Each structure stands twice: as structure tokens, then as C-alpha cells.
Image: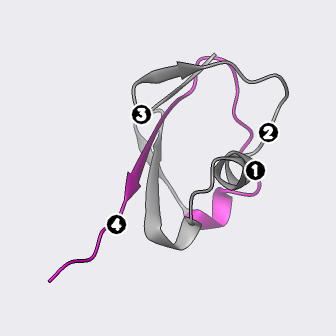
Amino acid sequence: MVTVNGKSIGLSENITVSEYLKQNQYRPERIAIELNGSILPKSAYNSTILKDGDVMEIVSFVGGG
């Protein structure tokens, strides 16, 4: 189980942060990710594999005016 934005999610396979974002239609250029209490650099999205017990917060940037 992985917790994403406070919701427990069961993943059927090992996937990277990048794959999770793609599957859930997030736009990486418009978000920031905190993984287990630390900001995850965008350069690490492709190489970071989500594992049981991870806690990920995804924050979307919203423009306005």
C-alpha cells in the first residue's frame, strides 16, 4: 500500500513515480512531489520506484489572475 494525498492505494506492480503520474494523468511540469517527507526532484521521477509504505503528496500549481 502506498498513501497518495492521504488516500491508501494498492499498487499491483512496482512502478516509478513517473509511471504513476502518467497513469493518473498528472502533468509533471505543473506539480511538485513530496515523498516520505522530502521533496522529490523532477530528475528522480523516472528512477524512483514506489514501494510499500511510501507516503506521497502531490501538489498541483494553479495559475490565476
* Mark 4 lies on residue: 61
Q: Is residue 46 left or right of residue 55?
A: right
* Mark 3 lies on residue: 5
Residue 46 found in image quarter: bottom right
Q: Amino acid at mark 2?
A: Ile
Q: Amino acid at mark 3?
A: Asn
Q: Residue at x 79, y 39 (%)?
A: 15
Callout 1–callout 2 Cβ contact below 8 Å = yes
x, y percentage for residue 54? 57, 26
Q: What is the secondary structure assignment of the residue under circle 2?
A: loop
x, y percentage for residue 21? 64, 52
Q: How many marks?
A: 4
Residue 19, labelled with which disc?
Answer: 1
Q: Amino acid at mark 4?
A: Phe
**49 part of magenta stretch:** yes
In-front residue for pair 48/2: 2
Q: Amino acid at mark 1?
A: Glu
* Mark 2 lies on residue: 15
Callout 1–callout 4 Cβ contact below 8 Å = no
Residues in magenta, as a range = 42-65
Q: CA distance from mark 3 to mark 1?
A: 17 Å
